[in-house]
Image (cartoon, rainbow, N blue to C red):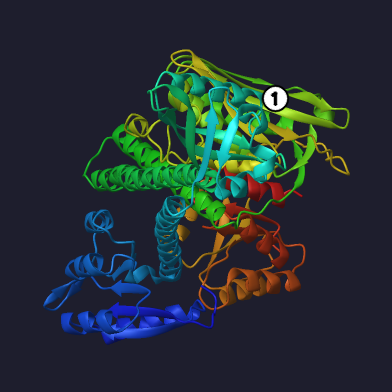
């Protein structure tokens, strides 16, 4: 929320002065313009709500003599339009979810106050939307009342015609409505003068009813003198002579053109409001399902990590049992990392912070790398994996975001492996000419898996979906992969769709423009394995976390690599000054004092040719670019795999 002339009125229910001051500092830090109202008991809370115009309530959950849940009940009962956000240090996950279901707008843990400003902004936006929704309903009701008053208070036109439909009498309001003068109407035929051919036939049918003594009320389009057509509501009755014979008819009518337009507008508004209501209900349902699902998805691998880590402490475990326990821990860690990466990606997409980094990409090489990566998993499930390239290698280099294209294909292939019990999975692409000046690459991932029902293919790319919410219990995953893939495809200027038949498999397709790079890529050379038994290198590892340092040392224990250690940026620079035998630096970017960026810059001043590989827990492209600008020659994302680490080390040592 940017600085505005009208500050936000914040009521904070909190019994701890330090926490109160800390929260105010966070709000000021995020440039939120606000007036702060403090309450630490029920009486002050009620008094402020009664006498002040409050925009948002922040509340601790546990207070002496008064609870946050009681405060929320009071606020939602008497001030339902005010968003209510819990800011607590003791709220558990179950209590938080229960509070959200009971009406809380959001919750923020005191040890995660970085979420406070976004939560406040989001709560105020939702409150504004709710007010707009209520205003729309009130406006609709007001319009209905206005049009009803207008129609009921309007003067009616009066017209008398004989059995031949000749007009014999009109009043002044008839002239006002039709635009004709009395001389232009009296003596003229009604159905030909005031109606077009189709509506004129209806008038003749009504005259036949009058001659049978039948009266009715109907709506019809009338043509005015200026050729404008207006809707009228007419009450028609037969006219009798003294002998009881029908001599003609009388029509009392009113102009309902404005009412008709209002009805059309009301129908449109009703449709929009109904759609908005359905979307809001669907959003609430998906939010609840996601909270429950993500809790399950995080707890499951965490249970595997903690549980099997505890089991590893068992004395005298057989080596094969230890190996199995370690494998489970590694699988659980990879699964949790995948969930975290998906949540980060979808958050950046929602915030509009996902940036494209276009570069030359060898599509064929990318597909071959993915084939090599997924082949072991496919083989373990007895699934035949095939890759198809649509262009020769020399023509398969395009200008695109390599990382995002790889993630799209990875998500689709992982989905295919997840939902395919047996059979085959084919992936690849072919070029397709759209117009004389436009060619696209149409990628596909085809499987023989479970398939998707026809009535669910339109929701498969929505967030937190796996075909349907019920499927989220049958297959692991947060249901974000396809949504992320769709967002990436659209960012790259393409479109994505699915063709599927339940029980017979699915084909996921997406198109990307074939943008040729200005220059061609150098031919890639394969990494060559060297005999590490005959060589020895000196590696400086700059890492402030003891566990991470021990992990790297364990990875390189048998690789004939001598390791120097540094736990600060300053120490890393000193080690380089004092040890000319260092062949390579593995640099942690986040260290106390002098960070890895500054340490790298100083090391490059001392030894410009000394390779520096950045290691970071952040996988953002921006972080990698910042490392390169600081002088790093390459980078590795944590958790570090042994094969990837060795490839990077020998690749730069042998250059």
Mark 1 highlights which residue?
429
Residue at the extreme left of the image, as rendered: 65
Residue at position x 56%, y 49% from top?
A: 173
**Quadrant of residue 516 in the image?**
top right
Where is residue 355? Give x, y as percent.
66, 54
Does 582 sit above or below residue 433?
below
Residue 411: where, in percent of width, then height? 54, 35
* Residue situated in front as seen by the camera: 410 or 653: 410
Mark 1: secondary structure: strand
Q: Residue at x 63, y 37 (%)?
A: 186
Q: Residue at x 67, y 46 (%)?
A: 181
Residue 616 position by quadrant: bottom right
Q: Depth check: give the residue in front, 230 or 512.
A: 230
Vertical side of 247 occupied by 409: above or below = below
Q: Residues within 10 Å of mark 1 (few under 14, many from 20)?
A: many
> Horizontal and vertical percent for residue 160?
52, 35
**Left or right relative to 310: residue 354:** right
Residue 58 picture quarter: bottom left
Left or right: 440, with 501 as reference point: right
- Residue 590 in the image: above or below residue 320: below
Whether residue 485 appears in this view of the structure is: no
Residue 162: tell me if it is visible: yes
């Amino acid at each position: 929320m940017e600085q505005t002339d009208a500050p936000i009125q914040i009521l904070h229910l909190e019994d701890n002065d330090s926490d109160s001051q800390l929260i105010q500092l966070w709000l000021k830090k995020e440039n939120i313009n606000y007036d702060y109202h403090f309450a630490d008991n029920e009486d002050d809370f009620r008094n402020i709500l009664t006498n002040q115009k409050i925009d948002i309530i922040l509340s601790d959950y546990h207070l002496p003599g008064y609870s946050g849940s009681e405060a929320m009940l009071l606020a939602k009962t008497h001030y339902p339009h005010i968003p209510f956000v819990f800011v607590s240090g003791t709220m558990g996950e179950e209590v938080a979810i229960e509070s959200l279901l009971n009406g809380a707008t959001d919750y923020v843990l005191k040890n995660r106050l970085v979420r406070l400003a976004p939560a406040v902004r989001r709560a105020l936006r939702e409150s504004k939307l709710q007010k707009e929704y209520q205003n729309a309903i009130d406006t609709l009701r007001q319009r209905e009342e206005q049009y009803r008053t207008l129609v009921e208070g309007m003067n009616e036109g009066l017209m008398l015609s004989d059995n031949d439909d000749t007009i014999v009498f009109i009043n002044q309001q008839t002239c006002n409505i039709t635009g004709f003068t009395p001389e232009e109407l009296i003596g003229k035929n009604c159905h030909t003068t005031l109606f077009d051919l189709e509506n004129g036939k209806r008038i003749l049918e009504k005259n036949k009813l009058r001659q049978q003594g039948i009266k009715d009320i109907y709506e019809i389009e009338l043509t005015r003198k200026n050729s404008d057509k207006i809707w009228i509501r007419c009450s028609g009755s037969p006219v009798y002579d003294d002998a009881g014979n029908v001599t003609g008819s009388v029509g009392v009518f009113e102009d309902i053109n404005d009412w008709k337009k209002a009805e059309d507008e009301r129908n449109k508004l009703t449709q929009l409001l109904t759609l908005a209501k359905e979307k809001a209900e669907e959003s609430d349902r998906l939010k609840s399902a996601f909270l429950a699902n993500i809790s399950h998805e995080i707890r499951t691998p965490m249970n595997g990590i903690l549980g099997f880590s505890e089991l590893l402490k068992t004395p005298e475990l057989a080596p094969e049992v230890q190996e199995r326990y370690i494998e489970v821990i590694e699988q659980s860690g990879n699964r949790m990392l995948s969930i975290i990466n998906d949540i980060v990606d979808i958050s950046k997409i929602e915030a509009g912070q996902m940036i494209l980094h276009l570069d030359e990409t060898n599509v064929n090489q990318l597909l071959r790398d993915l084939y090599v990566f997924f082949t072991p998993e496919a083989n373990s499930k007895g699934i035949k994996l095939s890759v198809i390239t649509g262009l020769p290698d020399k023509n398969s280099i395009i200008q695109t975001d390599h990382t995002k294209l790889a993630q799209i294909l990875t998500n689709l292939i992982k989905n295919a492996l997840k939902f395919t019990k047996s059979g085959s999975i084919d992936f690849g692409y072919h070029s397709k000419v759209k117009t004389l000046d436009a060619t696209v690459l149409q990628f596909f991932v085809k499987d023989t898996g479970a398939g998707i029902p026809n009535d669910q293919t339109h929701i498969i790319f929505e967030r937190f979906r796996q075909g349907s919410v019920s499927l989220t219990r049958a297959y692991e995953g947060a249901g974000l992969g396809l949504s992320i893939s769709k967002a990436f495809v659209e960012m790259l200027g393409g479109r994505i769709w699915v063709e599927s038949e339940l029980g017979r498999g699915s084909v996921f397709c997406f198109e990307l423009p074939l943008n040729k790079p200005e220059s061609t890529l150098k031919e890639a050379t394969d990494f060559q394995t060297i005999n590490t038994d005959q060589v020895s290198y000196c590696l400086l590892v700059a890492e402030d976390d003891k566990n991470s340092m021990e992990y790297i040392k364990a990875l390189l224990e048998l690789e004939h690599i001598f390791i120097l250690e540094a736990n600060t940026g300053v120490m890393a620079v000193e080690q380089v000054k004092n040890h000319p035998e260092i062949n390579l630096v593995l640099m942690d970017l986040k260290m106390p004092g002098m960070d890895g960026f500054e340490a790298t810059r100083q090391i490059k001043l001392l030894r410009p040719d000394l390779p520096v590989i950045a290691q970071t827990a952040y996988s953002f492209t921006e972080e990698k670019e910042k490392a390169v600008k600081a002088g790093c020659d390459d980078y590795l994302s944590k958790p570090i795999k042994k094969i990837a680490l060795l490839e990077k080390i020998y690749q730069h040592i042998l250059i």
